[in-house]
Image: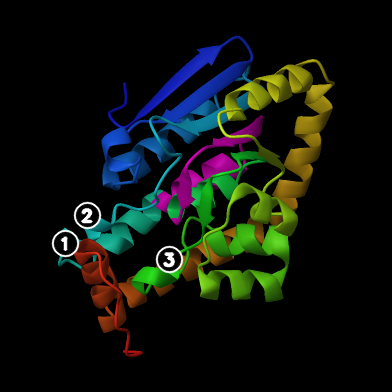
Amino acid sequence: MYETIQLEIAERKATLTLNRPTAMNAMDFTMMRELADCFEALHKEQGVQVLVIKGEGKVFSAGGDVKMMASSTDFSDFGTIMGDIARLVKAYYTLPMLTIAQIHGASAGLGFSLALGSDIIVAEQSSKLAMNFIGIGLIPDGAGHFFMKERLGTAKAKQMIWEGKVLNGEEALALGLIDYNVADGAASVVVDQLVGKLLASPILAMIETKQILHGANLGQLEQILQGESAGQVKMRQTKDHLEGIQAFVEKRVPQFNGK
């Protein structure tokens, strides 16, 4: 049904796997669109009460596909793709089920934004977690600003976004960016235990609480998504961004000049 993701539903649990392992599950245009379509479709799956998101292969997701960006000279492409990103974020944030991100390896950029949108985040100790858009002269998208602010508060969110630091599981847990830091190789076991505990709980009441709290935040989420869309299109046209992606492809340190 999908090219870049896999969805499995078993009784009250759904598992969504990001499935571009040879590209470190980097999100190209197809994956972004398919995630949006999938999350919207899951709203109709009334029997599903827990959704687990994970990555195939060695990582969760390296984020947006930088090589795709480098190969495109059409700045309007971001306007189109930001629409799909907004769709996937809103559909994911409003899902009438509890969501768990199961992280191993890298979860960076848009991949980290997606993980942060989850109700519960489980990451392995050696995970590399980063809101690192700044490294290629961009701002967070996928509601990265919104989710970082929710987890850290405005002041700390700004500092973390500006720094673009790569965190391991222990560091991310200490900051409150994730909920469980587990031993390498143990994420799937811990997530299975969490799913069992949730499904044995009065989960309808838990989902109702989520919908009340998330519903109250929807206005701000939509405002931030609009700001990210306009800002990302603007940043896409800067010399710093072009230098950032060129340096990434060439595996060298970028030389930014504030233009």
Question: The magenta stretch spans which residues?
Answer: 85-109
Q: Residue at x 64, y 14 (%)?
A: 12
Q: Are marks 2 and 3 in contact (CB under 8 Å)?
A: no
User: Which quadrant of the rendered structure holds the C terminus?
Assistant: bottom left
Quarter occupied by residue 195: top right
Q: Are marks 1 and 2 in contact (CB under 8 Å)?
A: yes
Disc 3: CA contacts within 10 A as few (<14), some (14-19) or many (>=20) = many
Type of amino acid under label 3? Phe
Residue 22, x across and y down, in percent: 26, 36
Quarter occupied by residue 123: top right
Type of amino acid under label 2? Met
How many dots with numbers? 3
Q: CA distance from mark 1 to mark 3?
A: 18 Å
Residue 58, x across and y down, in percent: 40, 35
Which mark, residue 133? Answer: 3
**Mark 1 or mark 3: which is in front?**
3
Magenta stretch holds residue 98: yes
In the displayed structure, would residue 150 be above or below residue 115? Answer: below
N-terminal of the two: label 1 or label 3? 1
In the displayed structure, would residue 46 be above or below residue 156? Answer: above
Q: Residue furthest top?
A: 11
Element marked by disc 1: loop
Type of amino acid under label 1? Ser
Q: Is residue 91 left or right of residue 198?
A: left
Q: Residue at x 34, y 46 (%)?
A: 27
The residue that mark 2 highlights is 68
Residue 137, x across and y down, in percent: 36, 74
